[in-house]
Amino acid sequence: MNVMPSNGPRLLQITDTHLFADPAAEQAGVVPEARFRATLRAMAPWAATADGLLHTGDLVHDGSAPGYQRVRQALRSLDLPGLVMPGNHDDRDELQSTFAAGPVRAARTLELGEWTLIGLDSLQTGEVPGHLDESELAALDEALADCSTVYCLVAVHHPPFPVGTPWLDAIGLDNPDALFRRLAADHRVRAVVCGHVHMAFDGHANGCRTLSTPATATQFLAGAEAFAIDRGPPAFRWLDLRADGGIDTDVVRVTGV
């Protein structure tokens, strides 16, 4: 277990927790709450050497206030500053209200040493695919203009890149070109990290490193033509943001769930 960070800040990413108002509720054959709690326990030793926390959406499956409150309380137990952003299952207003203040917030940016984490909102209410509207793209432009750090990492729920699983590639971000034009124009942006696809991916698109992370809830089967479940365990990702602009990263699978 590589719990010691490299020569830069360490970021921990968790995604697609899909909690319900009822902690015992099942979704796609698992109890999301139980898998979320197991993932948090596995993250605890990593949190002791980390600098920040990221949740890339679908915090709650049913938009319920009790679900958001439990996610907030649980994430705060890691004792890290962090960002959360909505996914397609989230209720934007409830999420923003719950995470309006505190160490883990629904904010635009988080500075971690010489890196700035920029969070984007790709939620289209009532739709599964994501979209960055003009106001969100303008907010990205403003965040990049205001950024004073050497490097940036962009986070968004819906991947703006294909992951090689046809049914998931059809429900990613529907306007990726608008995003990548901005990322390509700023050499400080080193990667874009996402959730939504419930699987691990590490590649490149339009000259930018692209990362997705498994869910803490049900996993999806990589390469499947249509919806299919992978019975694998929950997971989280660690990212060591190096002083030279590189990123060391891997996924940690949670055992014993």
Image: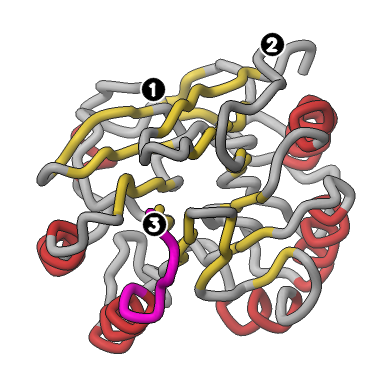
Q: Please tell me whether mark 3 or mark 2 is closer to you in this view.
A: 3
Query: Crowdedness of circle 3 by 10 Å Cα count: few (<14), some, many (20+)?
Result: some
Does residue 159 appear in the picture of this structure?
Answer: yes
Where does the image place residue 240, in percent across and percent down from the top left? 53, 33
Looking at the image, which is closer to me, 137 or 38? 137
The one of 26 and 100 positioned closer to us in this rendering: 100
Determine crowd level at label 2: few under 14, some 14-19, many 20+ residues with C-alpha closer than 10 A: few
Which callout, 3 or 1, points at the residue further toward the start of the chain?
A: 3
With 130 as the anchor, is 84 left or right in this view? right
In the rendered image, the quadrant that contains the N terminus is top right
Q: Position of residue 48 (x, y in %)?
A: 82, 35
Answer whether labels 3 and 1 touch (C-beta < 8 Å). no
Q: Would you place residue 85 above or below residue 163 in this image?
A: below
Left or right position of 192 against 232: left
Q: Which residue is mark 3?
A: 150
First to last magenta residue range: 144-152
Q: Name the quadrant containing residue 247.
A: top left
Three-letter code for the amino acid on which mark 2 is drawn: Met
x and y percentages locating residue 201 in the rendered image: 35, 28
Q: Quickly name the residue at label 1.
A: 221
Q: Nearer the viewer, mark 2 or mark 1?
A: 2
First-in-chain label (3 vs 2) = 2
Identified by mark 1, the residue type is Leu
Q: Position of residue 28 (x, y in %)?
A: 58, 35
Q: Could you tell me which residue is drawn at 58 percent across and 75 percent down?
A: 107
User: How many residues crowd mark 1 within 10 Å: few (<14), some (14–19), many (20+)?
Assistant: some
Residue depicted at 42% across the width and 77% down the height: 125
Is 20 in the magenta? no
Position above or below: 15 against 257: below
Q: Residue at x 75, y 38 (%)?
A: 36
> Label 2 belongs to which residue?
1
| Secondary structure type for disc 3 | loop
